[in-house]
Image (spheres, rainbow, N blue to C red):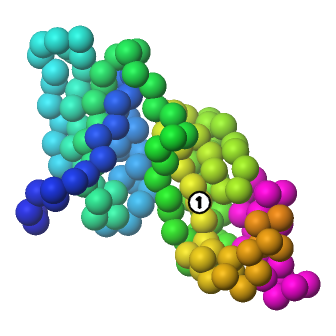
Amino acid sequence: MGATPKISPFLWFESRAEEAAEFYVALFPDSRVMSVSAVSAGPAKGGAVVEFELSGQRITALDGGPMFKLSPAVSFVVSCDSQEEIDRYWDALSEGGTLGWCGWLEDRFGLSWQVLPAELGELMAASPERVMETMFTMQKIDVGLLREAAQGA
């Protein structure tokens, strides 16, 4: 195990932090649950603190109760190398959740994700207006259509 990173995300779930962490580590490569600890005092008493890594990024999750909610103001971006990868992550993360637009979704635990092609910056640089107009018509990203838009098709 490497050094503790100076900055890492801390996610406040009402409940089900351990279930969420187990789902995420099963979905992403190079991921693992590192520890699960019971909260023995305070407003989160009876909940859990879960430390895990997603694709090498350390994250802590807490069963903190209903005081705070996750929101789309903070999301995780999944950078995908192919349409197949976009489809796989989109399908898994959106199951039981809420679909958004332009590659955004909220999973069944309330966490927001952006499932995007790794080449999005390059496509945007080629034709920002056409690519954005095309992207605004999509929930799940169709990278082929974005490529066509970038080429002026």
| Quarter of the image where one finds residue 17 | top left
What quarter of the picture does the N terminus occupy? bottom left
Residue at 22% over, 54% down: 7
What quarter of the picture does the C terminus occupy? bottom right
Q: Is residue 29 visible?
A: yes
Q: At label 1, which amino acid type do we have?
A: Val
Q: Which residue is mark 1?
A: 115
Q: Position of residue 38 (x, y in %)?
A: 16, 24
- Rendered view: 16 above or below 90: above
Is residue 6 inside the magenta stretch?
no
Residue at 12% over, 16% down: 40
Q: Which residues are magenta?
A: 134-153
Where disc 1 sits, the SS reads strand
Q: Residues within 10 Å of mark 1 (few under 14, many from 20)?
A: many
Residue at 10% over, 65% down: 2
Tell me if 31 is positioned left or right of 42 in this view: right
Residue at 15% over, 56% down: 6
- Rendered view: 152 above or below 91: below
Q: Position of residue 26 (x, y in %)?
A: 40, 53
| Quarter of the image where one finds residue 60 | top left
Task: Identify which residue, 77 or 45, lies in the foreground.
Answer: 77
- Rendered view: 117 above or below 64: below
